[in-house]
Amino acid sequence: MPKKIVIVGGHGNVSLRLARILGPSHSVTSIIRTPAHEDDIKAASATPLLLSLEESPVTDFTKAFHGADVVYFSAGAGGKGGEERTKSVDYEGALKVFDAIEAVEGVRPRLILVSAIDVRDPEKIPAHYTEEDKALATRVRGHIAAYMKWKYEADKNLVKRDAFKWTMLRPGGLNNEPGTGKASIGRTHLSPTISRDDVATALAMLLEREDAAGLAIDIVGGDTPIAEGLDAMIKKGETDFLG
């Protein structure tokens, strides 16, 4: 059955790929803040909707989400504007979307949120990390400290909510290579990088996986077919968000 989908952060590289996958079979609305991007959204088989995570009120997002089956949150400041803007978009913008979903009357949409691998309390090092993972985590946190901090605060807020169903996908480093349809999923290491095509494929597959509710799913480059890896992770039922 065709679903009604809303993508927040619709002009992102992964979001445009996601819209191209889902648009031909579903009703996709992509939220953007820049009118100049409307043609790109339409070319990706989606309908553009102008709203700003920083300036539009929660009520506008609630209206946009009414009747939707799934909301994808794939927005981010992208490191532009310093920590203040990262906080405004990646944290406060995310909470605005969470609040807007909670305010939907009747059946609320599911949320599929794009986070990032290794988003966690910096004092809690996952047991499966190798020395290479630990070194990479230290380098990344030194380079994009504000991003990791505010993504963590947003994710920490989300895991406490039970008014709607949610799933997180946590990709590692991204590349623009053609997708392989394969990945390493669930309690992964921090490398290798993964194609944006493959992240979009995983997000599209999660559309039908209501049984992934409450899970944070790590994904990096690998050799397991994405559908198979997601299925194994979901059946295991062990979240990758360690707090």
Image: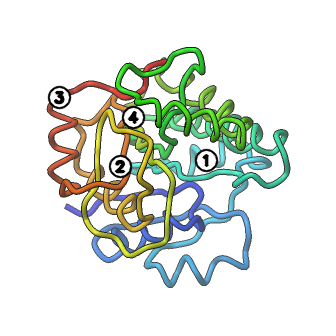
Q: Quadrant of residue 144?
A: top right
Pick out the residue farthest to the front.
131
Left or right of 229? Residue 107 is right
From the image, tell me which residue sits under label 1: 61
**Residue type, numbered disc 4:** Trp
Q: Which type of secondary structure does the marked residue at label 4 adopt?
A: strand
Question: Which of the marked residues, 3 or 1, is nearer the chain's N terminus?
Answer: 1
**Marks 4/1: CA distance?**
17 Å
From the image, tell me which residue sits under label 3: 236
| Closest to the observer, 236 or 44 | 236
**Marks 3/1: CA distance?**
34 Å
Question: Which of the marked residues, 2 or 1, is nearer the chain's N terminus?
Answer: 1
Crowding around mark 2 (Cα neighbors within 10 Å: few <14, some 14 to 19, many 20+) is some
Crowding around mark 4 (Cα neighbors within 10 Å: few <14, some 14 to 19, many 20+) is many
Q: Nearer the viewer, mark 3 or mark 1?
A: 3
Q: Which mark is residue 166?
A: 4
Question: Which of the marked residues, 2 or 3, is nearer the chain's N terminus?
Answer: 2
